Amino acid sequence: MDNATSIHAQAPVAHRTGKVYLVGAGPGDPGLLTLRGKELLQRAEVVVYDYLANPRLLRYVPEKATLIYAGKKGGGLHAYTQEGINKLLVEHAKAGKMVVRLKGGDPFIFGRGGEEMEELAAEGVSFEVVPGVTSASAAATYTGIPITHREYTASVAFITGHENPGKKFSAINWDKLATGAGTLVIYMGIKNLPEITQKLMAAGRAPETPVAVVRWASTPRQESLIGTLGTISDLVQEAGIKPPALVVVGEVVQLRHRINWFERRPLFGRRIVVTRTRVQASELVNQLEEMGADCFECPTIDIREMDDYSVLDQALQRLTEYDWLLFTSPNAVNYFFRRLQGTGKDSRALAGARIAAVGTATAGELERYGISADLLPEQFTGEGLADALLAQGDVAGRHFLLPQAQAASKVLPKKLTAAGAQLTIAPVYRNVPAVSSGNELREALSAGAIDALTFTSSSTVRNCFALLGCKDASSLQQLLGKTRIAAIGPVTAATLQEYGIETHIQPQQYTIADLVEAIVSYYGHDNPLPKVPSL
Ligand code: SAH
């Protein structure tokens, strides 16, 4: 697409008519959103979302869009009434907006999506509906229960358990359902579980029929409990299971012992704090979650531009004079190239210099600009990089450009200048303490609710401990209690030591992938199934 067309395509259209897209957010795992749903979120101008729609999906929404939380937490606390929501949708659509109505699971399965769309139809507002993975499907799949199975059942019923049990004429014919469908999946059934199980047994379903209750299915907080029609109500009460949870009744539940895959992942049930910058946290979070961890994101550092780029700007004027460009972080790469491109140049301007990266993440970032690093040290630290350059034996008198964080470690520059290098240090970004959830982290730690804290640089250590605000080493040690400490490498571990904190987990190689692997080996690869009473 050339420039002319792209400008044309983005021009605002006068008198646009709005439209509402009712989108199923899926059951919780953000990966279960449909491609169509994602595409619509990326174009949304207004998003009206529910309690059960994972807020992480909002990261696809453009920054300038309006986000409206429509609430609805089981058992009260409605942020909006149903009428209020209907009105919101109609108003925004009539104002010409592209509205996404995001609902948990599938909007047409116990989601009141039908009612909302009827209202839009009555108001003459156009709309489309995108189905989602319903929580019944996720709850079964993520606990290893095939909802149908040739040897066990050929039918499945989705039922609401929310009906008032005292209702004289129930719309649900429990007598027929009890034995009429092989698998029964009951939504919103926790509160009325004692009555429901009684009715099913009274209508002839055997008390030994296996039952699973699954809370927050498909999320890292998933909890599941197995019992029988006869025992499950008491078990749920003992365990204190609260909504949102689903009840799966039927012989297929037995298969879970063979095919439970989700809860067996190595870090399932482990609550791990990630303290990197907001931008970089995602890589570590993604990898930990892939292993099943429940990540608590507590960004301690924000990355900011410099106020003054004069050193870099001068260096960019005489790039051809440099023999080496040294990059010691992915951020340095990005801020360097942003500035370079701002002067109308691109990677070709670096053709004359050799380029070194401190580690694989930095090298990966360079690849994005079409550059393969000429040098990668064995040890991914500033010192490692200095040693690798010195080992090449051609440092004295050579010109080096080092674009880096304002308060970066001095080890690399010291070693190079000591060896006679001509070094230009260009600060290209700054680390500032993030305004973040220190209180929340402190509470979680004192409740013993955190399994491990991860640190990926000395500044994450300093900023995190500053956030926690302990007055001395012993109160910090006390707050951390049994929480395990994971550090990416020796420099970070040494900083922890300064605070009197011991590092329990540390990888051989200083990369995110190796850190995750070290955490996994620390906890053991085989996660035993959560304790469940046998049938
Ligand atoms: N439209 C939704 C259901 C909304 S009704 C869907 O298709 O899934 C709300 C009920 O759905 C909750 O009370 C609970 O029973 C169930 N539910 C939704 N998400 C769930 C989840 N992640 N885990 C377990 N149950 C869930």
Image (spheres, rainbow, N blue to C red):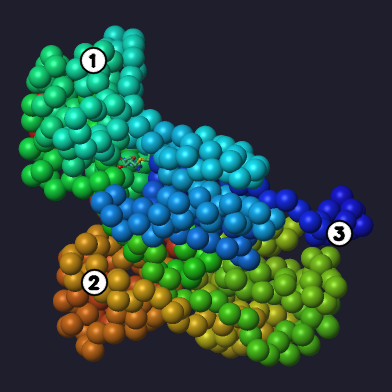
The answer to whether the residue labelled 1 contacts the one labelled 2, judged by CB atoms less than 8 Å apart, is: no
Residue 484 in the image: state x and y as whole percent.
Answer: 24, 64
In this view, the mark in front (3 or 1): 1
Residue 395 in the image: state x and y as whole percent.
Answer: 67, 79
Q: CA distance from mark 2 to mark 3?
A: 50 Å
Residue flagged by tag 2: what amino acid is it? Glu
In this view, the mark in front (2 or 3): 3
The residue at 45%/78% (across/down) is 434
Q: Which residue is mark 1?
A: 176
- Of the numbered discs 2 and 3, the one sitting upstream in the chain is 3
- Of the numbered discs 1 and 2, the one sitting upstream in the chain is 1
Q: CA distance from mark 3 to mark 1?
A: 62 Å
Number of the label disc, if any, that sits on residue 443? 2
Where in the image, quadrant-wise, is ligand 1 located? Answer: top left
Q: Indicate whether 436 appears above or below 86.
A: below
The residue at 22%/62% (across/down) is 449
The residue at 18%/82% (across/down) is 475
Q: Is residue 378 left or right of residue 10?
A: left
Q: Is residue 157 left or right of residue 43?
A: left
Crowding at dot 2, Cα within 10 Å, few <14 / some 14-19 / many 20+, comes out as some
Q: Which residue is mark 3?
A: 7
Which quarter of the rendered picture does the C terminus lie within? top left
Q: CA distance from mark 1 to mark 2?
A: 49 Å
Q: Indicate whether 329 appears above or below 165.
A: below
Residue 391 occupies quadrant? bottom right
